Image (cartoon, rainbow, N blue to C red):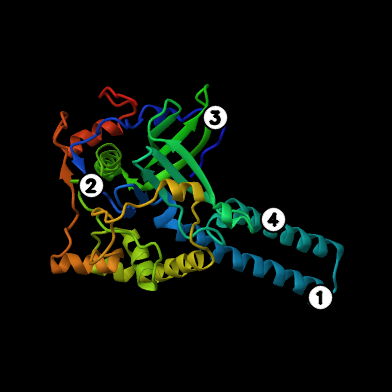
Amino acid sequence: MRCQAGVAIPEWDWHHRLPTGRFVGPVCGDKITTLRINSVFLDVTDQPHLQRHDLTFIVFLLLPLITCAIFSSYLLLFVIEPITFKSAIFDVAVTTISLAFSGFIYWRYVRRELFTLALRPVRFNRKNQRIYAMRERCRRGQEQYGDVVYEVPWRAKNVHFCIHRSKDANETLYHIRCYHVDEQNRIIFAFSIGREWHFSSMSDLLAQWNYWCWYMNKGPAQLPPPTLFLSERETLTETYLTCMFQWGFNTSAAFRLLVTPLTLINTVCRLLSLWTARDPIWPPRIVAACGREVGDEFDQPSGDTPVGWRATLSARFAGTYPDLPSSLIPEWSGTSDEDENAKEWMADRPQRSMEYA
């Protein structure tokens, strides 16, 4: 997520702020973001979680580059004769540029996925109406104080939840961001919540926001169950299925077979990322503020509730877990057509008047 502190909220994001006091669409449903839910808090993923292997893949691109640079330096300086001044300068320059580029890529991207945190959960606490976003691993020897966490109130004038739009050469992508700003509306910090959506999935994004609003404003009662509970500690099977479903949830068996080599590479990359990381440590003050209630009937996953792709898909086939659960918003007064509502939100300036809380 690219976000620079000290600048204004991007214009498109500013015009697509998400209200915390009312719903934004006719449907409420989780879309593969939930880790855990109970009467006190709801843990969801941050945006990069499902795609963290994409950044780790850079490691496999950097290693051959570094190896070739070092090997060519060895050949030119110690094997190939005679050594000339120009060849030595050229070799040193190539090696230096290669190592500098590799170091920049690692420092800019890969270090956030290797030797860091296996999860960066975002916690919605409905009791004190605050949100805690796990961001960075604490320094060595500081584990008793917990990892670095951003904290914002659910409702505040200096906190804005927005839909962020990003474009690349092939498609337009969206995700939900939280901006904490100063008195001049300049960004202090920001973090992403949930997952990333494609152009055709704006209705799912809005249903996801409704899910979090329902939880924070009305509680877990009558809230539909998540599409699945993501595993907080992935097994090898879960890692492979996460990489496989990155290609799409409704792709054919033939297509999945075709992309199996890439899926296996992504699986190795994700495993490398997870194996070099550790579980997050919540600071003691947050643990104290998020104490679970004894005998909480909404504490999930528990008992026979499936966790992860494999268990949930098996439960769906057996008919013991609902398929893509969602519910209609009883008090919704806008259009009942999800697609029409989504088109309004995809406009540069949505016509529906927004009530910001």
The answer to which of marks 1 and 2 sits earlier in the sequence is: 2
Query: How far from the left and from the top, in percent, is residue 209?
Result: 30, 40
Query: How far from the left and from the top, in percent, is residue 290?
Result: 40, 48
Q: Are marks 1 and 4 in contact (CB under 8 Å)?
A: no
Identify the disc placed on residue 188: none
Q: Amino acid at mark 2?
A: Gly
Secondary structure type for disc 1: helix
The answer to which of marks 2 and 4 sits earlier in the sequence is: 2
The answer to which of marks 1 and 4 sits earlier in the sequence is: 1
Secondary structure type for disc 2: loop
Q: Amino acid at mark 3?
A: Val
Q: Nearer the viewer, mark 1 or mark 4?
A: 4
* Real-space Cα separation, disc 1 to disc 3, in angstroms: 52 Å
Residue holding disc 2 = 29
* Real-space Cα separation, disc 2 to disc 3, in angstroms: 33 Å
Q: Residues within 10 Å of mark 2 (few under 14, many from 20)?
A: many
Name the quarter where the C terminus is drawn: top left
The answer to which of marks 2 and 3 sits earlier in the sequence is: 3
* Real-space Cα separation, disc 1 to disc 4, in angstroms: 23 Å
Q: Nearer the viewer, mark 1 or mark 2?
A: 2
The answer to whether 149 is drawn above or below residue 144 in the figure is above
Q: Nearer the viewer, mark 4 or mark 3?
A: 3
Q: In which image quadrant can residue 344 be found? A: top left
The answer to which of marks 1 and 3 sits earlier in the sequence is: 3
Q: In which image quadrant can residue 228 be found? A: bottom left
Query: How far from the left and from the top, in percent, is residue 177?
Result: 41, 39
Q: Amino acid at mark 4?
A: Ala
Query: How far from the left and from the top, in percent, is residue 207?
Result: 24, 42
Residue holding disc 4 = 100
Q: Residue at x 19, y 34 (%)?
A: 340
Q: Is residue 52 left or right of residue 100?
A: left
Residue holding disc 1 = 78
